[in-house]
Image: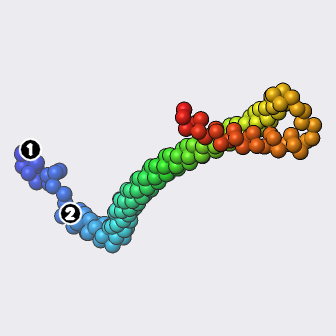
Amino acid sequence: MELILAAEQPLPILPHGDELVLGVVAFAILLFVLWKFAVPRFEALYEERTDAIEGGLKRAQETQEQADRLKKEYEEQLAGLRAEAARIRDDARAEGQQIKAELREEAEAEAARIKARGEEQVAASRDAAQRALRNEVGGLSVQLAERLLREQLADDSRRSATIDSFLGELDQSAPQRSGAN
């Protein structure tokens, strides 16, 4: 008999029909409420998150492109500055060579000027020495003439004339002597 009683009682695993209908209706209401209110909110949050991530990636990519562009501009400027520095160095070298050449020319001109002045001084000294020698020779020749002639030339004009004639004879004989040497 116990077996028969167990068969008449419902199985504890299976729900009652009323509970099953109530559960399905409650699930449908819950599904409708979730679908109507929660799912759009989740979709909006998902879209915001997606936009934020994609926007962040896009901004990061734009920032990377800008950084690459700035780096390229910097490298171009650096290359330009290096070329400018090389040009300045070359100009400075050329200017240094030009200054060096100008200084060399000035030094050579100064040396030529000093040499010319020295030659002029030598010529002036030689002329002064010749004049002094002529006067000395003139005086000696007058003394010699006085001794030889035993005549004293007291008159200055006669003395001067005698000296001038003697010097004239010396000048005429000097080119002949230097031509002989």
| Residue type marked 1 | Glu
Q: Quadrant of residue 155?
A: top right
Label 2 crowding class (10 Å Cα cut-off): few <14, some 14-19, many 20+?
Answer: few
Looking at this view, name the residue that lies furthest to the right. 154
Q: Earlier along the polypeptide chain: callout 1 or callout 2? A: 1
Camera-nearest residue between 76 and 105? 105
- Look at the image and tell me in which quarter the C terminus lies: top right
Query: Which of the labelled discs sits on residue 20, or is there none?
Result: 2
Q: Position of residue 93 (x, y in %)?
A: 49, 46
Camera-nearest residue between 77 and 46? 77
The reply to whether the C-beta atoms of the residues labelled 1 and 2 are less than 8 Å apart is no
Instruction: Give the side of residue 119 with respect to residue 72, left or right.
Output: right
> In percent of the image, x 61 and y 40: which residue is there?
175
Query: Which of the labelled discs sits on residue 19, or is there none?
Result: none
Q: In what element is the residue under mark 2?
A: helix
> In percent of the image, x 15 and y 55: which residue is there?
14
Q: Is residue 81 visible?
A: no
Residue that label 1 marks: 2
> In percent of the image, x 60 and y 46: which residue is there?
109
Closer to the eye: label 1 or 2? 2
Q: Position of residue 94 (x, y in %)?
A: 48, 49
Instruction: Give the side of residue 130 with respect to residue 64, left or right.
Output: right
Looking at the rendered structure, the number of numbered marks drawn on it comes to 2
Q: Position of residue 27 (x, y in %)?
A: 26, 65
| Residue type marked 2 | Leu
- Look at the image and tell me in which quarter the N terminus lies: top left
